Image (cartoon, grey):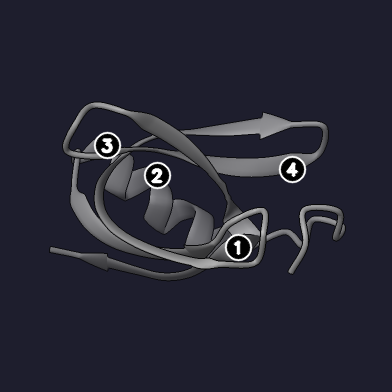
Amino acid sequence: MSKNEPYKPVSCATHSEYELLIMHREIIQLRWLDDNGINDLSMVTAKDLQTKAGEEFLIIEDNHGKQYQVRLDRIQLCTKI
């Protein structure tokens, strides 16, 4: 998946799961495809959801306090720790 592929909305149920993770400040194991199509796997904290230009993103924070945004349709695995 390249960064130029059109956004594919996630289900309402999946979106709600992300909202609950944020609300409870859950630490999660997250696997996603980055802009170069490379798999990333990290333990992170779900911080927020954002919408930009019709695309939705999960804002995550690593254990060093650095924040990233991950497009929701690129998330392959999201598991509570």
For label 4, the SS is strand
In the picture of the structure, the residue carrying the numbered disc 2 is 19
For label 1, the SS is helix
> Nearer the N terminus, badge 1 or badge 2?
2
**What's the CA distance linking mark 4 and mark 3?**
21 Å
In the picture of the structure, the residue carrying the numbered disc 1 is 74
In the picture of the structure, the residue carrying the numbered disc 3 is 23
> Nearer the N terminus, badge 4 or badge 1?
4
- Contact? badges 1 and 2 (CB < 8 Å): no
Placement of the C terminus among the 4 image quadrants? bottom left
The amino acid type found where label 4 is placed reads Glu
For label 3, the SS is helix
> Nearer the N terminus, badge 4 or badge 3?
3
In the picture of the structure, the residue carrying the numbered disc 4 is 55
Residue 59 to residue 1: above or below: above
The amino acid type found where label 2 is placed reads Glu
Residue 46 rendering spot, x and y as whole percentages:
32, 42
Residue farthest to the left? 81
- Contact? badges 4 and 3 (CB < 8 Å): no
- Contact? badges 4 and 1 (CB < 8 Å): no
Residue 7 rendering spot, x and y as whole percentages:
79, 56
The amino acid type found where label 3 is placed reads Met
